């Protein structure tokens, strides 16, 4: 998935279909045996029995390909609304509103109080994720991370803990570190954005996490399905005897 957002948003007429059984309006229907099924009443009817009606809805112009994307349930995904033509998130959902992906990917959108920032080093600050706003930023970064590492699972609000890594001037995100707690601290994911790699940020983040979080749970921490780079990093930092693969 891409995070190119929208060029513009307008109000326009979008076609819905009214169920002949219960009267519910749908923008998308499930078809089986050449009949169309209503999600509410589960009735199955020929398509011609559904009455078309046009309603005013928001329509975005995709920032990737320029195609119109109707902001209705059939185009809704995990984080917001996406373009089926170029696999781009045209708008992310936040509360009852919509927000541009580029806005979410700007650390200043988080309105971070200075005293909430953790100093990992002079070149890297971190923020613990606690709010839904902060998790939305994390999820947006994960969209890019999943393109590179398809096995990454989405962070779960209330289940996972995370550090967002940011530049000291809050100009951009550097990546994130995701973990969970059982009898041990479990390092689930570590990600540094491509343009900021080979600068030591991953090493700084892992060492900080081990000292400030993992060591306070147990002398040994676990690592979930580490790839070759993560294994190499942990060995380089001297954690070969301290961590366990899960």
Image (tube, rainbow, N blue to C red):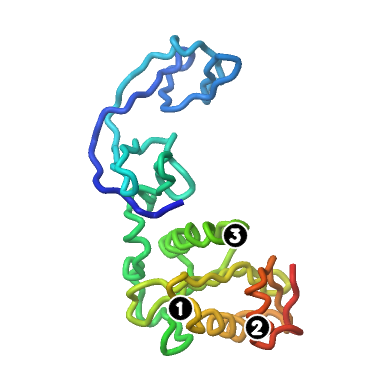
Q: Residues within 10 Å of mark 1 (few under 14, many from 20)?
A: many
Residue displayed at 71% across by 73% down: 222
User: Residue 117 sits in which quadrant?
Assistant: bottom left
Crowdedness near tag 3: few (<14), some (14–19) or many (≥20) residues, C-alpha within 10 Å: some
Counting from the top left corner in percent of width and height, residue 40 is at: 52, 24
Question: What is the CA distance from the residue labelled 2 to the residue labelled 1?
Answer: 18 Å
Residues 200 and 156: in front is 200
The residue at which mark 1 appears reads as 126
Query: Depth-wise, is mark 3 or mark 2 nearer the camera?
Result: 3
Quarter the C terminus occupies = bottom right
Mark whose residue sits in front, 3 or 1: 3
Q: CA distance from mark 3 to mark 2?
A: 25 Å
Query: Could you tell me residue 180's position as x and y percent?
Result: 63, 68
Q: Residue at x 43, y 14 (%)?
A: 50
Label 3 sits on a secondary structure element that is: loop
Left or right of 72: which side holds 130? Answer: right
Q: Are marks 3 and 1 in contact (CB under 8 Å)?
A: no
Residue 44, compared with residue 64, is above or below; it is above
On the image, numbered disc 3 is attached to which residue? 152
Q: Nearer the viewer, residue 214 or 206?
A: 206
Residue wearing tag 2: 216
Provide residue 30's location: percent of width, then percent of height: 53, 24
């Amino acid at each position: 998935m891409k995070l190119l957002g929208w060029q513009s948003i307008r109000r326009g007429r979008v076609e819905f279909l009214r169920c002949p059984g219960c009267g519910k309006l749908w923008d998308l229907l499930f078809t089986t045996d050449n009949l169309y099924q209503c999600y509410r009443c589960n009735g199955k009817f020929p398509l011609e029995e559904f009455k078309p009606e046009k309603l005013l809805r928001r329509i975005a112009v995709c920032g990737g390909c320029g195609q119109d994307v109707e902001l209705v349930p059939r185009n809704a995904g995990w984080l917001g609304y996406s373009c089926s033509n170029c696999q781009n998130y045209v708008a992310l959902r936040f509360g009852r509103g919509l927000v541009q992906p580029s806005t979410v990917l700007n650390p200043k959108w988080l309105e971070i109080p200075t005293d909430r920032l953790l100093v990992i080093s002079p070149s890297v600050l971190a923020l613990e994720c606690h709010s839904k706003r902060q998790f939305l930023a994390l999820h947006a970064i994960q969209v890019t991370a999943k393109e590179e590492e398809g096995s990454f699972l989405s962070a779960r609000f209330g289940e996972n803990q995370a550090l967002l890594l940011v530049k000291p001037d809050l100009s951009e995100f550097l990546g994130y570190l995701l973990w969970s707690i059982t009898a041990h601290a479990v390092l689930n994911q570590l990600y540094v954005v491509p343009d900021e790699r080979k600068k030591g940020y991953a090493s700084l983040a892992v060492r900080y996490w081990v000292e400030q979080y993992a060591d306070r749970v147990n002398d040994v921490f676990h690592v979930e399905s580490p790839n070759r780079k993560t294994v190499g990093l942990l060995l380089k930092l001297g954690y070969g005897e301290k961590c366990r693969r899960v």
